[in-house]
Image (cartoon, helix red, strand yellow):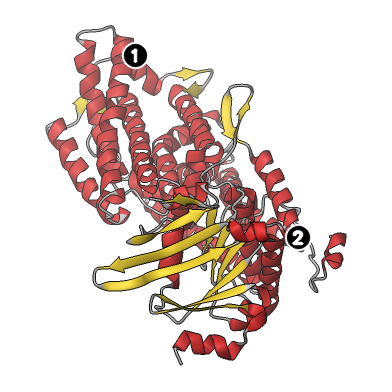
Amino acid sequence: MTTTSSTGETHVAPQADHGDPARSLIARIADGRAWLFLAGLIICFEVWSRLAFGATFVLNPFNLQSIAIFAVAPLLLATGQTFVIISGGIDLSLGFIMGLAAVVAAHATNMAGAAIPLPLAMLAGILAAVLVAGVPGIINGLLISRLRIPPFIGTLGMFGVARGAAYLLAGGTTVPVQNSWFALLGNGKFHGVPYLVMITAVFVVVMHYILSQTRFGQHNYAIGANVQAARRAGIDIKDHILRLYVLSAMCAGLGGALYAARFTAGAAQAGEPLLLDSVAAVVIGGASLFGGSGTIFGTVAGALVIAVIQYGLVFVNVEPFWQFIAVGLVIIISVLIDQAQRRFSGARQDE
Amino acid sequence: MNNQEQTPLLEVRNLSKHFGAVRALNDFSMVVRPGEVVALAGDNGAGKTTLIKAISGVFQPTGGEILLRGQPVSFSTPQEAREKGIETIYQDLALADNLSIGANIFLGREPMRKAFGFLPVLDRKAMAVAAKQTMGRLDFHVSRLDAPVSNFSGGQRQAVAIGRAVYWDAQILIMDEPTAALGVPEQRKVISLIHQLKAQGRGVIFISHNLQDIFAVSDRIVVLRRGIQAGERKISETNHDEVVKLMVGG
């Protein structure tokens, strides 16, 4: 900085990022708001349950297990949705891709079980579900990247197609699974931790790695913030978008397979109520629907917030319809915090 | 000096670009020498944008040739032009606002390292170090390298865009209205950045509507009018009135 004056220029170069710590504190609170929500909710339910029933809410291992199981399916959809929303898109077809995958998993496991040992048949069923889920993902990706259909419309179309395909494949009913290993996977526990939760935890960590540590994840953020900039930087946008929607569809595919394991049956409507929960989890988790921000762990917190509300309200014996209101309010508050944070950082740019 | 005259960094010879019957650029020639700032001036629709898009590989010229250090080149994509050292800095700042300075400099070419000896991860540290050094060369000092570039002002972000070009060793920087969206102090910052690029021996093509900026920073000015070269002047031998006359054809 001292060399500046000798160049003959009249300007001096001050530290370019003065005064940032205050902003970064607020930004950090805003970024972590999902975890604050979660902590607040747990405290509320704990107090409520102690006052009303004299029983603990959060220290009860059965409650924790149930909440974790509750959160698994929406979380699997929401991890894929997180990638899509960060890129500035949305995937409305995930719910029925999950249903399709659940039906495929059930059929494939049954068919494979007739020929090969049950554990292998289970793996074949899961693999088939994930691969079949990739097909609508490819179509979504091609429609959006090649034919420039807006993600909202393209995936809304696929919502219908996947729904119809799932019901046709299921013959309009649920498809029971005859495979004891598959049932064990869906309902078994290891030291009190359900297998489903363990699989989901590993999966979430892998997805966090992809989003935060790889070029694919980095480009995903860049595309969400400024497609033009990403294109000019030489990123192959079409290829990225295609892989993105295949990835999100395969997340839903895994969700469908685990659904089939949990209920030992595949049902076309498996993911129907979960689609909006997945979007809500991503938004509560701190992602902006305009793209460019969000994290996997934020989404985990978002999914847990929804699960705690749903399970907690049942636990304290409130009419279940209040769940919708509570989740809705949390979404609105979350978006308000996001807006306030944007205004704040925007104001700083004006000086 | 004579040696420099003989091998210009960039030479455009009789370049033409036709869109159907429209001759957006017709038989246009210019040179850029190392350490030289050449301003392109002209009214809207005069062909400035067509020219820079032809040079930076966005358009294929209809006729004529582009020489880089005396060698004829042709670019089918902007990527190829960039690899040869021609970087365009756009008016609307081609930055991802949510990423750090380092991530923007390396966008699309991120360095990787192995975590725990096997797992490939983004080498954020290398990016931050490179960002700090590069921005330091542009007299732009920043300590919080993980902050997204949206935290910085317009001129500072312009500096990041220029820093990216400098890091990737661009020899020719095409700057399209780099001062248009900025306040006065920020404009002066960008002008001083251009002076530094010049001192480093790079060639700059500077497009602006602002004659004051052009006279503050350029060595020569090339005026375009309806796709042809309406005149070329050394800045030291001309004045605002003459340039305006060339632009409007008076």
Q: Which of B245/A146 is in front?
A: B245
Residue B41: image location, x then y, percent = 51, 77
Residue at 18% from the left image edge and 44% from the top image edge: A161
Q: What element carries label 1?
A: helix
Which image quarter: residue A260?
A: top left
Label 1 marks a residue whose chain is A
Q: Nearer the viewer, mark 1 or mark 2?
A: 2
Q: Is residue B24 above or below residue A36?
A: below
Amino acid residing under circle 1? Trp
Amino acid residing under circle 2? Asp
Tell me whether marks 1 and 2 sit on the same chain.
Answer: no
Taking the image as shown, residue B217 lies to the left or right of residue B206, namely right
Count neighbours of disc 1 (C-alpha within 10 A) and say few if under 14, some if 14 to 19, many if 20 or more. Answer: some
Q: Which residue does the numbered mark 1 point to in the structure image?
A: A181
Label 2 marks a residue whose chain is B
Q: Which residue does the numbered mark 2 point to in the structure image?
A: B139
Q: Which of A331/B199 is in front?
A: B199
Q: Is residue B190 above or below residue A259?
A: below
What's the CA distance linking mark 1 and mark 2?
65 Å
Residue A196: image location, x then y, percent = 43, 26
Taking the image as shown, residue A170 lies to the left or right of residue B97, namely left
Residue at 59% from the left image edge and 56% from the top image edge: B7
Residue A314: image location, x then y, percent = 43, 44
Residue A112 can be seen, yes or no: yes
Q: What element carries label 2?
A: loop
Residue A68: image location, x then y, percent = 48, 34
Residue A26 can be seen, yes or no: no
Q: Which of A234/B176 is in front?
A: B176
Count neighbours of disc 2 (C-alpha within 10 A) and say few if under 14, some if 14 to 19, many if 20 or more. Answer: many
